[in-house]
Image (cartoon, rainbow, N blue to C red):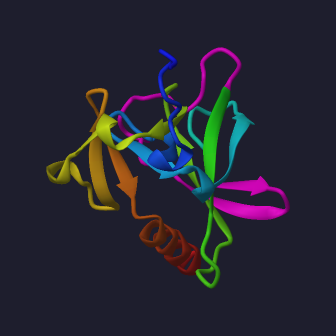
Amino acid sequence: MSDAPAAVEEDDGQWCILLRLSGSERWAVPQNALAEIVTLHSKSGEPPEELAWRGELVPVLDFGHDDGVPWRERVGGTGLVAVFLGLEGENCKYWGMAVRGTDLAVKQLLPDQVDDAPDEVVEHASAAFTLDGIIYQVPDLVALQRRVAASMDAA
């Protein structure tokens, strides 16, 4: 009989990307919802409104433009944009979110690590939970893509 701890089964948890989007908002998104996290060199302190990525023009949302959390690093002048896979038929194959701060991580979320926080759900999220004392939103990616697509139609 071994004293080694049992291995965690892959299907016991959900692999997520943890992103900070503003001073008050952090997201947990399934790993398979992201196409790529792009590093951009920028002279501006603000993310672009759209990004040329792999032959596509990708619209970029920014939830943190007014809260003081920097988008780009002071040293090196780079910022991150998370590029999401879009749903077919919604007028954009991909769309992006500006990532602010340095709180980017990939983590397997196990049920006993998270506590539901239904009172903390923001307008564009479908759920919220607390992990290690931090509130994360589970974004409504379909609604956000439709919001991006509608703004592209209006432009």
* Up-down relation of residue 45 to residue 14 (above or below): above
Q: At which x and y percent is residue 37?
A: 67, 43
Q: Position of residue 11 (x, y in %)?
A: 51, 50
Q: Quadrant of residue 22?
A: top left
130 part of magenta stretch: no
Can you give x and y, in whole percent of width and height, for residue 53 in the image? 78, 55
Residue 4, position as x, y percentages in the image: 51, 18
Q: Main secondary structure of the magenta part?
A: loop
Question: What segment carries the magenta color?
Answer: 50-77
Q: Which one is nearer the viewer's eye here, 110 or 98?
A: 110
Residue name at image x 35 percent, y 33 percent:
23
Residue 65 within the magenta-colored segment of the rendering: yes
Q: Is residue 84 above or below residue 137?
A: below
Q: Quadrant of residue 32?
A: bottom right
Residue located at (27% from left, 38% from top): 130
Give me the residue at 52% from left, 69% from top: 145
Splitting the image into 4 quarters, where does residue 94 fall? bottom right
Nearer the observer, 93 or 63: 93
Q: Along the line of sight, which residue is nearer the eye, 79 or 11?
A: 11
- Does residue 48 appear in this view? no
- In this rendering, the answer to whether 77 lies above or below 147 is above
